[in-house]
Image: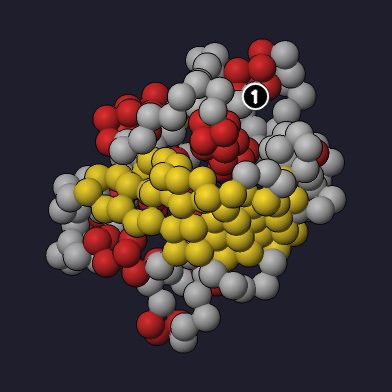
Amino acid sequence: MAGEKETTKVAIDKYRRFLHEDHVAAAGTIGWRHGSPPIYDSVNNVFEQGRTKVWPEGSLEETIQNSIKTFEMELKYKTCIKDFRTINPEKFKLFVNGREGLSAEETLKVGGYNVVLKSSMPNEFKYHKEDQETFESSHTAFRSAFPRGFAWELIKVYTGPPVVTYKFRHWGFFEGPFKGHAPTAEMIQFYGIGIMKVDKSLRVEELELYYDPAELFGGLLKGPKISESNIEHQGQDDNTTTQHCPYNHN
């Protein structure tokens, strides 16, 4: 999630498949949201220092973990579904907490945070008002809250392909302001369950996610309210230009 930088440095990442070859072999042909692939050095440090599992190289667990990290990277930073290598774009559906599934194009348009944080609660009780957020505004808010990144790890695989059922953990350190709340520097984490249907190439066809958003927002809203003058510059380091999909001029 948070904690990545967009830069001209060549992207080499041992946890995200295809990132290096996409940068080198296909330079100029892939639509990157900020013009070039992200560098995950900061969030990788959070991951390596705080993970509870170290999976053997080549194991099913390591393969699944890296595949999911790669999908998350593509969803955040690629602008064209045709460039996604982790999903079957014709069949892909994403379901979160039992809600109606979204296609690949719908998921990309809405944005990862807005998809997973959507709630059926009345607006006045929502932690995250997805109808008032854009792709960029939601990402800016979480990059501000977790400047070193919000790490993800696989905890357990219950069933293997073609239907992979797994438990995951998300965590980070609340070290920047979040929507008017001061940071506490505390670790915030939550656990969840995923059910992922894959094809023979491990491309995702369906993904179901189940977790409790209150575990995330309970920590983020714990910080005291701060004045507008102290947060007016929040997110101003995000003035990079988005490189849009050449096949989508809308």
Question: Callout 1: helix, strand or loop?
Answer: loop
User: Relative to 38, is 89 on the left or the right?
Assistant: right
User: Relative to 28, is 221 on the left or the right?
Assistant: left
| Residue for point 51% across, 31% down | 62
Closer-to-camera residue (250/64): 64
User: Relative to 238, is 11 on the left or the right?
Assistant: right
In the image, is residue 237 above or below residue 100?
above
**Location of mark 1 (residue):** 18
**Within 10 angstroms of label 1, few (less than 14), some, or many (20 or more) residues?**
some
- Inspect this view and state whether residue 10 appears: yes
In the image, is residue 91 above or below residue 31?
below
* Residue 61: % across, % down: 52, 35
| Residue for point 43% across, 33% down | 4
* Residue 125: % across, % down: 38, 82
Type of colouring: secondary structure
Locate the N terminus and report the quarter of the image it occupies. top left
* Residue 150: % across, % down: 37, 43
Closer-to-camera residue (240/95): 95
In the image, is residue 33 above or below residue 16?
below
- Inspect this view and state whether residue 36 appears: no
* Residue 13: % across, % down: 51, 21
Amino acid type for the residue under numbered disc 1: Phe
Residue 95 quadrant: bottom right
Residue furthest to the front in view is 159
| Residue for point 32% across, 36% down | 51
User: Relative to 222, is 121 on the left or the right?
Assistant: right
| Residue for point 61% across, 40% down | 71
